[in-house]
Amino acid sequence: MRVASLTPAGTDILEAIGGLGLLDTSGHAADADVVLLGEPQAARFGPSATVVFVHPRSIEDVLDDIVRVGEACGLAAAADRVMVALRARYCDAQNAVNAFVDGPTVAVLTALNPLQAAGFWVPGMVVAAGGRPVGPPPGDPPRVMTPDQLAQARPDRLVVATAEATAAAQIEAIRKTPWWSRLPAVKQGRVAVRGGGAFTRPGPRLIEDFEWLAAWLNR
């Protein structure tokens, strides 16, 4: 079996379930038996290829995607084991959350120029970790925000999770702007920078991101 992954999240899932040996690195999706896609796109597949879309809206969708990829690639048992283990870690992390108090307002930015509040699975992660997300509601696409809109939201915690190569320079630039110093998260020293695809790749790594987030919000 040959698997073509046209999305980083699909490759992450394939690695987690022990399927990297099936990965077709030739770049010819038309020759693959299984094609993993993030979104519908104009690519040519063989008539018998199984196409699996990896485009979740929540953590639950991510866990479901792991199972679906495993079934398509003949690794259903391994995928089930990975899914169960990740779900257990997710539930354990939620045990740190105090459900009886209002949590902090949390902004997760996945782009800085312009500012973009994370969407899809991230707002739901913030809610599950005990926070109140700034930006779109759970499941909705990311939302572009102006600096004034972010300042008016008054986030208690701020996470910068951008894969942009110029992120460090952009962060340094916005630290010099007047609105940055007005953010409660900045005044209280509660700003975290998470790189390496954190929060932006909807695969098994999201559970590690959630563990960190739940611990950080509930210290």
Image: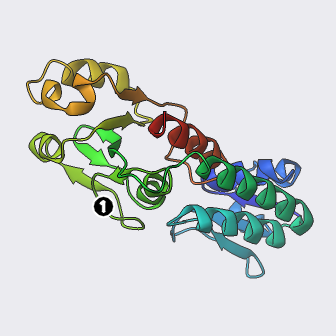
Residue under the point 71% across and 49% down: 89
Q: Position of residue 61 (x, y in %)?
A: 60, 68
Residue plotted at (19% across, 42% down): 154
- Against 176, residue 42 (above or below) is below
Horizontal placement of 159 versus 125: left or right? left
User: In front: 38, or 207?
Assistant: 207
Q: Position of residue 44 (x, y in %)?
A: 62, 70
Q: Residue at x 75, y 48 (%)?
A: 25
Q: Nearer the viewer, residue 154 or 194?
A: 154
Q: Which residue is denoted by mark 1 in the rendering?
A: 136
Q: Quadrant of residue 82?
A: bottom right
The answer to whether residue 121 is above or below residue 158 is below
Residue 58, image x, y percentages = 53, 64
Residue 52 in view (yes/no):
yes
In the picture, the quarter occupied by the N terminus is bottom right
Residue 104 or residue 175, whichever sits in front: 104
Q: Is residue 186 above or below residue 5?
A: above
Badge 1 element:
loop
